[in-house]
Image (cartoon, grey):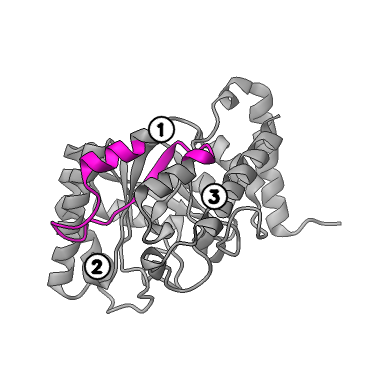
Amino acid sequence: MKKQNFEAKTEKIRAAFLDLKKKQPEIFKTRLNLSWSNWGFGMEPLSDSAARLQKSGIKFIELHGNHYGLDLGYKVAETKKVLADHGIETAGICGMFSPDNDLSSNRGIHRQAAVDYLKRELEFTKQMGGSYILVVPGAVGRPNAYDKSEFERSVTTLQLVADLFAKNKIKAAIEPIRSAEVSLVHTIADAKKYIAAVGHPGIGHINGDVYHMQSEESHIAEALLDAGDQLLNLHMADSNRCALGEGAMDLDAIIMALYLIGFNAKGHYVTPEPLGPGGDPYPAMHGKPDKKLLDAMVSQTARYFREREEALLS
């Protein structure tokens, strides 16, 4: 029986993976770096979050970019101590972009807020030893466009801080998000176009998110191959945006694609971010945490990911 189109694409990736595994087995000695994006844990102390990640063997964290004002957000010394106490390093920062700090807004005050926000996060990221900040070209939770000039406004606004990214040696990782949540940049191809338009060496990387990709890409693993060495971080959740193993996501194909692009190199991260379904996930960061539920979600996700990785590499 003839394979379905997506099956044929997956088989092509599997064949390439097995060929590489046979010819260059040394490449696979280093496993993928597993991190976690913590803003979905809601209003819980960072020490609780760090303890949870440590228990599941997760050594990196993508910190909530919560410096919404000069007096708000994580403090460097305190945050460093909490993470060090649990053997966790800062991978990067999850930039949070709402209509209040929208790079593409038709209101200058909101674009200025986005610039100021990125300046604060750049300083924090540098002091924490993180390597990237996620940048969303338009506000999350606003799927309807202001007008036809959003792309150009977003590009021009991000250019204002591009030199700072390069100066601080922090990578800007552009995140495509599904069209149900944002008004522009929905695919890997869109992100490449946006990066090219910014045209600056400080803005050159991509943050993928498999939940968004299942809505916008024809084949997730194939899109990851297309992202290639521009891919810096990959948000993970199952097809229902819950813990890995609870949905129908083809995790094996994703893992194979990541090894094919050399994603197990230092400075690249697989970062679960299971937030549950919905058009606007931002309320999750204000929620009261259910510690038992979160403990189970992290434990299952980490265990299932490593099980699938080992099954492919053994």
Foreground pick, 287 / 194? 287
Q: CA distance from mark 1 to mark 3?
A: 17 Å
Query: Where's residue 180, x and y in %?
Result: 46, 74
| Mark earlier in primary sequence (1, 3) | 1
- Between marks 2 and 3, how big is the CA–CA gap? 31 Å
Q: Residues within 10 Å of mark 3 (few under 14, many from 20)?
A: many
Q: What type is the residue that disc 1 sits on?
A: Gly
Residue at 44 percent across and 71 percent down: it is 179
- In what quadrant of the picture does the N terminus appear? bottom right
Mark in front: 1 vs 2: 1
In primary-sequence order, the first of circles 2 and 3 is: 2
Label 2 with label 3: CB-CB less than 8 Å: no
Q: Residue at x 54, y 52 (%)?
A: 295
How many C-alpha atoms fall within 10 Å of the one at disc 1: few (<14), some, or many (≥20)? some
Residue 123 lies in the magenta stretch: no
Which amino acid type is marked by label 2? Asp
Left or right of 114 on screen, residue 135: right
Picture coordinates of residue 7 (x, y %)?
72, 54
Q: What is the C-alpha distance between the residues marked 1 and 2? A: 35 Å
Residue 123 visible in this rendered orientation of the protein? yes
- 264 left or right, relative to 62: right
- Examine the rendered structure and indicate whether residue 216 appears above or below residue 229: below
Badge number at residue 175: none
Residue pictured at 50% horizontal, 47% vertical: 226
Residue designated by label 2: 102
- What is the number of the mark on residue 87? 1
Q: Magenta residues, as a range?
A: 54-83
* Residue 154 at x, y percent in the picture: 24, 63
The crowd level at tag 2 (other Cα within 10 Å; few <14, some 14-19, many 20+) is many
Q: Which mark is residue 298?
A: 3
